[in-house]
Image: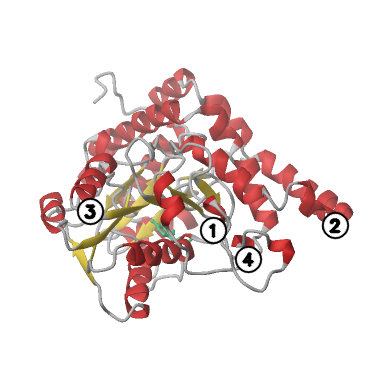
Amino acid sequence: MNSSFRTDRTYALELDRQDPLSAFREQFVIDNPDMIYMDGNSLGRLPKVVAERVNSVVTGEWGNDLIRSWNQGWWESPTRIGEKIATLIGAAPGQVIVGDSVSVDLFKLTTAVLSLQSGRTKIITDTLNFPSDLYVLQGCISLLGNKHKIIRIGSQDGEITPDLQALYNAIDRDTALVTLSHVVFKSGYLYDMAAITEKAHQVGALVIWDLCHSVGALPIELDACHVDFALGCTYKYLNGGPGSPAFVYASQDMGQNATSPIWGWWSQSSPFSFDLDYIPAPGMKKFLTGSQPIISMLSLEAALEPHLQAGMQPLRKKSIQMSEYFIQLSDSILSPLGFKLGSPRIPEQRGSHISLRHPEGYRINRVLIDELNVIPDFREPDNIRYGLAPIYTTFADIWDAADRSRQAVADKLYEKIPLTRLTVT
Ligand SMILES: Cc1ncc(COP(=O)(O)O)c(C=O)c1O
């Protein structure tokens, strides 16, 4: 906790003046500074360089160069961009590839793991995981003849932190796979990747880490933690744009041993020989299948620039400073109005978003968006998530978000919002 903390806005402006990363905000399109964007943990802001790059890809590379562009950087883009992401997640060259979505890639990795682990029947995950991950696991089990069972570890504190003792007890010699979100999507709880991976390996289980809410928000050391597989999305903290492709990581061993279940020409060893029989490409290319969305792929490549320049350690330092500040503000001005912290209090146990819980969370979130020019998001049953993206969020943004949340409740502004939910919350 910072002892010089004050609740006035001038203090936020002082923190912004001291922020060594403040210049990075200039690299993003921010047309309306009064609109406080707190959803970079869901869809990151648009980097200016992406707008320029999309224009040159569409008009120059597609419009003018046409099919020749495949030989001028398009074909190799999944591997080339994978190498850039590798530097953000502690992976040596040759271990990361970009393509498809997290859900599709999780299907590939899960089936690959289960076929390497024949005879073992347990898949360990938790109730805090993103539901799509659980659906994919259920689909894999159904496809493979219902021989496996999923163990979902719960939480003893209302879905903020997982029951770690139960998790450790559940991982045994019948465990094929442990798969968890590194940072969980509602509370922002951050797992100890090294410890859980080690526990899994002690009994011969393999791990898949979902990095969606940690990549670009904090340093990750996949090789040093001896992780088998990981994957993540690129449209949140990495700012790749809506639906930008996911990435897949495999350790050196797993990259050689695993077999992807979806075979296609992009993962074939010599795609332009058009052989009738499939031979997988060596290395990570085996996790590709077919044509990739090249405009989105190249947008992502440009979007990585600010993170590659800033480095993950300074970004993490700022992220922790921001979340501590937000929690202090919340304790001072929001908790008297019924807001409760829905994220861990210990900074080392959380990612870069903070959930505040309130019985009127849905309507508060909506009135913030519709009338108070603050954009967080809402996750059932009562979580308002405030995403703090260290590359562009300011301390003044945080003060404004807290103050307008106060106003939403103190002035009962939320009462005019209907209780029926919009499709996207
Ligand atoms: C933790 C987590 N895992 C998986 C997904 C699914 O990603 P995709 O829609 O790219 O399949 C998301 C999406 O937000 C997520 O937050």
Q: In the image, which disc is placed on residue 290?
A: 4
Task: Read off the residue under disc 2.
Answer: 66
Q: Is residue 125 left or right of residue 275?
A: left
Distance between the alpha carbons at the discs numbered 4 and 3: 33 Å
Q: Is residue 408 left or right of residue 91?
A: left
Task: Read off the residue under disc 3.
Answer: 204
Horizontal and vertical percent for residue 316? Answer: 39, 31
- Quadrant assignment for the C terminus: bottom left
The tag earlier along the polypeptide, 4 or 3, is: 3
Q: Tell me whether the residue at label 1 lies in contact with that at label 3, contact meaning CB atoms closer than 8 angstroms.
A: no
Q: Tell me whether the residue at label 4 lies in contact with that at label 3, contact meaning CB atoms closer than 8 angstroms.
A: no
Distance between the alpha carbons at the discs numbered 1 and 4: 11 Å
Q: Nearer the viewer, residue 220 or 338?
A: 220
Q: Amino acid at mark 3?
A: Gly
Horizontal and vertical percent for residue 215? Answer: 44, 43
Q: Nearer the viewer, mark 1 or mark 4?
A: 1
Q: Tell me whether the residue at label 4 lies in contact with that at label 2, contact meaning CB atoms closer than 8 angstroms.
A: no
